[in-house]
Image (tube, grey):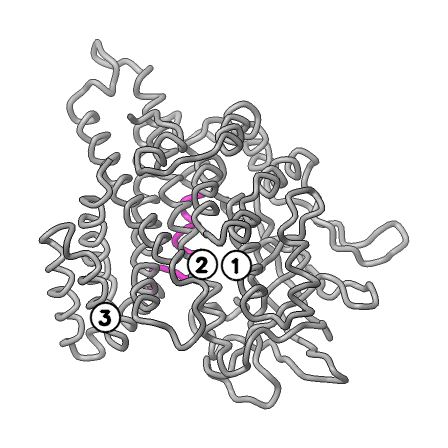
Amino acid sequence: MYALKPSELLKKFGVELDKDILSYEDWWFDKGIKVSESVDRMGTVPLRMFDRLGNRIDEVLYPEEYWEMLYKGYKIGIVARVFEKKDIMPFFNIGYIVSFFDAGLYCPYTVSLSTAIPIHKYAEEDIKNRYLPKMLLQSEDVWQGATWMTEVKGGSDLGNTVETIAEYRNGKWILNGEKYFASNVGAELAVVAARIKGKPKGVKNLSLFLLPKYKENGQLNYHIRRIKDKIGTRSVPTGEVELKDSEAYLLGEERFGIYLILEVLNISRVANSVGSVALMHRAIYEAYRFASERWAFGKRIIEHPLLKRQFEDKWELTLKAFSLAYETAQVLNRVYMQKPPYSPEYHMFRLLAHLSKYWTAEVCVQTCKWAMEVNGGMGVLSEYPVERLLRESMILPIWEGTPHRQALDAVEVIVKKDAHLFLYEYLREYDSRSEDILNICREIKEMPDEDKEKYADIYINELAETVSDVLYKKYKP
């Protein structure tokens, strides 16, 4: 069971994949995995800022094999299928396969979907008709998206740290500012958080804008200052972006901007959860390959009682993490087209998203660390797979909101929206332990405000473990 392919684990949870997706998985085993490893080894991708005539072009210089790997996902319909089928689950099913081989590569697809959905929901009709079809192409002509919220002072306190200013000038929205962590830099479109000129700082005064790569006159609409030198996820370029009189389009109503921003982030948080579980799966897969061939004291090391039990524990943990991430995706699938004000089910989704993003990323890091330990000295060598898996895993708790942010936001949706009550009613039929959800959240609500924050991570970790246990009873393959 530890050598299951991604598609085989999905099947155990009742997911049926078509022959095109299964062929896509075969391509990864045959060729993609080598391309992915090569991209990681090349390190930080170069940026060509000017052409030979001195014109600013800001071109990200991946090798040709990278683009083949990237476009494979778009061609299989990782984004397009969501709109064709009006179903977000194909995105997560294909994304699980992608992340098993390359968790960083799932990021371009994720931020593309997180751009396409708000265009579909909130853009004016002419803007939607102009841009959305290009994002749904299943060819190398596809347009990619990006989600740029974070500035140099950080992303948790968006109300005070977003200093990008939007001004309506001569019939156009014009943005000026910087984005410090701009993943999938170079994308043809990005959704960007900005504050409208004259409004005071605060989350209620943020709005969401759609930013094309090029202005209407054909000039670059944003400039890439540099590509970040990251510990991992080198298959997605992350850069610093300068916005100087950049043309943009307002998405939705100004007053609902923060809700739209959080919609974008929560889609990515679910993808982060799915990617974390896939990376856990890969770590166990690689640990098993080594442990099945390594001999010590007269037998394969996987046959020794301690390691045998650890494999059992890690596999069950992975299945629990999958149950939590996949259920969160299923709930998102029912609510992602809602607009503010949201239903109780949407607030339940918010709670699940915070729990899932927080917990799956944390257990992923520990599982990848353990896989390195199983490999011993071979585990720290960059020429073998598990060293990279640990580096990749370290980024997952940071992307789309740190563990601290997830814990605090989970507490908020419990206290302000009573989301735990809806979650309890949703899960009570699967296991009597669902009663613990009420008990944990009751303690949270009864605490003084300072203690709610002081102990947030402890209680949210316990709540996430509880919910994953209950969902494992529902899904147990």
Residue 290 x/y as whole percent:
35, 21
Disc 1 target residue? 114
Q: Name the front one of labels 2 and 3.
A: 2
Residue type, numbered disc 1: Ser
Q: Which residues are magenta?
A: 391-404
Give the CA separation, mark 2 to mark 3: 27 Å
| Residue most extreme to the right | 53
Question: Which residue in the protein does label 2 denote?
Answer: 267
**Residue 102 vs residue 462: left or right?**
right
Task: Tell me if residue 362 comes above or below residue 308 in the rendering.
Answer: below
- Residue 186 can be seen in this image: no
The label shown at residue 35 is: none
Q: Residue at x 33, y 49 (%)?
A: 325
x and y percent of residue 131 in the render? 68, 61
Name the amino acid, label 2. Ile
Q: Disc 1 versus disc 3: distance between alpha carbons?
A: 32 Å
Query: Where's the C terminus, which quadrant?
Result: top left
Residues at marks 1 and 2 touching, judged by CB atoms closer than 8 Å: yes
Q: Residues within 10 Å of mark 1 (few under 14, many from 20)?
A: many
Give the residue displayed 28% in from the left and 45% down from the top.
323
* In magenta segment, residue 395: yes
Q: Which mark is residue 454?
A: 3
What kind of element bears circle 2? Answer: helix
Q: Is residue 278 above or below residue 218?
A: above
Q: Position of residue 117 (x, y in %)?
A: 53, 61
Whichever of labels 2 and 3 marks the residue nearer the N terminus, that label is 2
Q: Earlier in the sequence, mark 1 or mark 2?
A: 1
**Quadrant hosting residue 78:** top right
Q: Secondary structure at mark 3?
A: helix
Residue located 20% across and 25% down the image: 308
Q: CA distance from mark 1 to mark 2?
A: 6 Å
Percent of width and height locating residue 80: 57, 49
